[in-house]
Amino acid sequence: MTSLPLVFDAPRRALPPRHLADLDPAERRAAVAELGLPGFRADQVARHYFGRFTADVDAMTDLSPAARDVLRPLLPELVTPVLEQACDDGATRKTLWKGHDGTRAESVLMGYPDRATVCVSSQAGCGMACPFCATGQGGLERNMSTGEIVEQVRQAAAAARDGALGAPARLSNVVFMGMGEPLANYKRVVAALRRITSPAPDGLGISARGVTVSTVGLVPAIDKLAAEGLPVTLAVSLHTPDDELRDTLVPVNNRWKVDEVLDAARRYAMTTGRRVSIEYALIRDVNDHPWRADLLGKKLAQRIGKHRVHVNLIPLNPTPGSEWDASPRRVQDEFVRRVEAAGVACTVRDTRGREIAAACGQLAASEA
Ligand code: SAH
């Protein structure tokens, strides 16, 4: 029985071992007590991990060697870098990670004059099946654990501090725009949000204002998130204002329609006081028509309110094997003009990392 090889599905889908970053402060103290150490040791190890971005127990020299050995199981290596690529003169760095079970996920660290942002994955793969997205083509492999999500942020914070972007920088922003649908992994993502935004020793101390959760529009989960008391920014991947096209571009639209999603976005903005961001990947001759820009502006102004929303246009980053392409510049400019004419702010996303395939699962896909 013990010699059965682990070739079945279930072990691949198992979540990784328990990690310090999975635990809230009370759970952390309980876990340390279970290991037979006094509760203050829990805060000590957390101060290293969350406050100094140190996951190496042996570097925690204010703990005795014996205590380090006892605490070691709380800090298993969850994500191991297998590939790193840089571009934009080193201001964009992409990391491909391997999980304990071999699953692949990626994150991207981006430096700007006034901030440093990491884009993280929340699932290995994705079940939402958007046809223009590289991750959507492979299906969902498994959810990522809270610890795996926090580890991407912790390692990015350490890298930024240690000068990976050139000069030492403080990680100020976290966007859930890597692989996966964060609101489909709700519990673990919300726990990760708490670890990311709580001040040390309970968390990494990144302001909730600097954190963005991007979703295809899972309406009940948007409402639940609004009630968490975590004023993170919500981004909704709309991609078109009409149901007919959105049913194919974002298949979950067959469950929650454009108007329902926009109404949930308005409720989110009202509850949290945060302006919502609407993501719109401009695809040549697919969703870039002037009438769609007009309808988008009108619907956003009516259903959300023009001061509670802004549009983020993303020039499509073509996925290998797809016939879709980004819109020509003048079509993009006209689209922006029309959305703004409705009184809604509209900017074009600075596209980082094109040449390192830093879009939504492209690196993991090219490696596979
Ligand atoms: N599942 C979440 C977050 C992951 S993707 C969501 O859909 O919002 C982050 C953003 O990148 C989404 O707006 C997504 O639609 C967009 N995106 C995916 N593939 C893209 C591509 N090939 N070009 C441009 N944007 C893309």
Image (cartoon, helix red, strand yellow):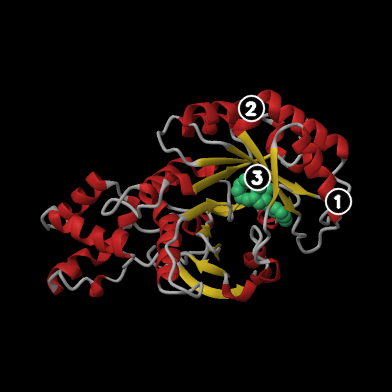
* Labels 2 and 3: the sequence-earlier one: 3
Question: Is residue 296 positioned above or below 112 on the image?
Answer: above
> Where is mark 2, residue-wise?
304
**Callout 3: 10 Å neighbours few (<14), some, many (20+)?**
some
Question: Is residue 263 positioned above or below 120 on the image?
Answer: above
Q: Quadrant of the C terminus?
A: bottom right
Instruction: Specify the quadrant of the image occupied by residue 41.
Output: bottom left
For mark 1, give the secondary structure.
Answer: loop
* Labels 1 and 2: the sequence-earlier one: 1
Nearer to us in this view, 339 or 233? 339
Q: In which quarter of the image is the N terminus?
A: bottom left
Q: Position of residue 63 (x, y in %)?
A: 15, 69
Label 3 lies in ligand 1 vicinity (Cβ under 8 Å): yes
Label 2 and label 3: CA atoms lie apart by 24 Å
Identify residue type, mark 1: Arg
Front position among marks 2 and 3:
2
Residue 284 placement, left or right of 95? right
Q: Decide if residue 182 is in sight here.
A: yes
> Where is mark 1, residue-wise?
284
* Labels 1 and 3: the sequence-earlier one: 3
Residue that appears at 32% across and 52% down: 203
**Callout 1: 10 Å neighbours few (<14), some, many (20+)?**
some
Nearer to us in this view, 1 or 218? 218
Label 1 and label 2: CA atoms lie apart by 27 Å
Q: Position of residue 273 (x, y in %)?
A: 49, 31
Q: Position of residue 246 (x, y in %)?
A: 76, 37
Nearer to us in this view, 153 or 39? 153
Question: Is residue 129 positioned above or below 263 on the image?
Answer: below
Q: Decide if residue 143 is in sight here.
A: no
Residue that appears at 86% across and 57% down: 323
Instruction: Specify the quadrant of the image occupied by residue 249.
Output: top right
> Where is mark 3, residue-wise?
128
